[in-house]
Image: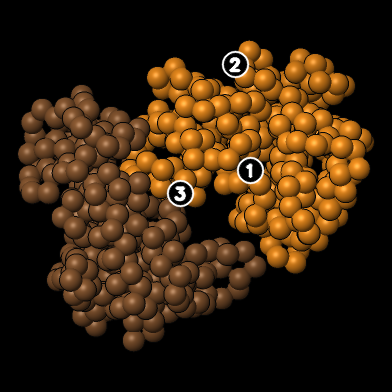
Chain colours: A brown, B orange
Amino acid sequence: VRETLVPVELPGAAERGPLIEASRDAVLLRVPGVGRFLVEAKDPVLVERATGATAADICCFRNGPIAAAAALLRGKVAFRAAAVAIGGRAVVLCGASAVGKSALAAALAQRGHPVLADAVAVISGLDQEGVPTVEPLAPDVVLWPDSVQELGLRSECGRRVRPGLAKRAYSIGPDPVASPLAAVAILRAEENRTEPAFDPLEGASKLRALMAVCWHLRLVEPLGRSAAQFRSLAHLTRATPCVRVVRPRRGASPMLLAELVEKLAA
Amino acid sequence: VTARTVWLASYPKSGNTWLRAVCTAWLNEGPVDLNALVGTPIAASRDHFDVALGIPSSSMTPEEIDLVRPRVDELIAAEAAEPHLRKIHDAYLEGPAGEPIVSVPATRAAVYVIRDPRDVAVSYAHGRGMSLERAQRHLNNPEAALSADDERLHAQLRQRLGTWSQHVRSWVDDTPFPVEVVRYEDFVAAPVETFGRALRSLGLADVDERRVDEAVARAAFERLRQAERDYGFHERVPGGADFFRRGEAGSWRDELPAKLAAQIRQEHGEVMARFGYD
């Protein structure tokens, strides 16, 4: 990341969203109160800080949307997901916002599994139908106070990620290395469910589920990646088990889910 | 920006879900699926925000989120069928830049469901597992908001409510789009007429009395309560009682201590009188 002046708008953008614009070879992200980020296929990411924004504010987005935009520009797939390596093979943990992905990743890290990613999981090796591999992005897991308490962590051991937010980053578990993808787990919370359960996905429903967890799909077409992205996801659909992990809406501890995900990986 | 959105707005525990259940029965065949009501997800859905913008709301402050929520409305409206019904509990207040919390250009109209605040207080206390005294104070707190504590990542974004009176005034007075006000008490007393009026104001075609009667029957309170018992309801607040409890108008008379009822009357009397709550 290099700090410099960044344009307010992206010249020649084919997609102009409220916070993200994209042309064939660049993505511009505007985060209110934080700054503007210009991401291209090659490093560095250019950043112009908003007035009053701190270095921590900038860093907070680096392993999330910035990493995802860079991955897309480099022909990779980015999921809104956490990822851990279990026995040297990666399990990607997807699901709706606030479903408990980070808490589950932290619970798995406490059981000795390295964390590969928290906010965004980048999958490479999908072109030429290679081995899908999860790249290590952020060994820290970012947790809110309720998860910190539930996992028995000490609040003061966490690093505040942004001055205005209560969530903190924790280094738990061994250092990660790039790991071949073993499975994609899609978390879902349901009413009237008393115990967590697996629900394997196959065929078209699997492909649809994987598309639904991709980061910001609306950028794929303006970046000229529609066909390649579809090929990548189709390859992933064939090559990788995908399971819906349905948990009770209340009372399913991250530790219990972690045991279940370990079984899934095995 | 296309004005496609019709807001189903209310203070919490005021009949919003009942209205959405009738809309669902109107638009669909068969039993009403409580966990797939029209108008959901709520306007403050965190996941909707994150998917629409590509920037995680969990890394933004509530003020930064409020700045861009109208833009999310516009993105969603642009891709929706018309009329696009959306549930909302936020008061119609301005965000940090002076813009309303919802996109005005993306809004076609709103239906505002109002309920006697004494019944709201009782229902709110049961629904959230809090005392009646605390519920009464909540209704009179100008800083009241939903999903506002930062102890956890809520599935919903922060929603400012203000006091009950502020909430009503914010939607009913000087809103720059048509707002149809319907009373919960009229849902109970004259359901076909009142729900029919609401359905017409939502822009749903062919609102004839026989079909409204049939939709109201399929979304009858007893059926909704049974559906919650059978399948659960994902909008129930953790720690609270069943979402569908009594479904009556005026039950505050035997559940709310006279002192609290008088307090609410004193704090909200002006708006209560406007809407016939004496």
Where residue A90 sits: x, y (%)? Answer: 26, 74
Q: Is residue B153 above or below residue B14?
A: below
In the rendered structure, which amino acid carries the disc numbered 1?
A: Gly
Q: Is residue A145 above or below residue B261?
A: below
* Left or right: B243 as drawn, with respect to A248: right
Subunit bearing disc 1:
B
Where residue B277 sits: x, y (%)? Answer: 85, 24
Query: Mark 3 and mark 2: span between their CA atoms?
Result: 28 Å
Question: Which is more foreground, mark 1 or mark 3?
Answer: 1
Crowd around label 3: few <14 · some 14–19 · many ≥20 (10 Å): many
Q: Residue pushed farthest bottom?
A: A266
Q: Earlier in the sequence, mark 2 or mark 1?
A: 1
In the rendered structure, which amino acid carries the disc numbered 3?
A: Asp
> What residue sits right under mark 2 in the picture?
B176
Q: Earlier in the sequence, mark 3 or mark 2?
A: 3
Q: Residue B225 appears in which quarter of the rendering?
A: bottom right
Residue B47 image label: 3
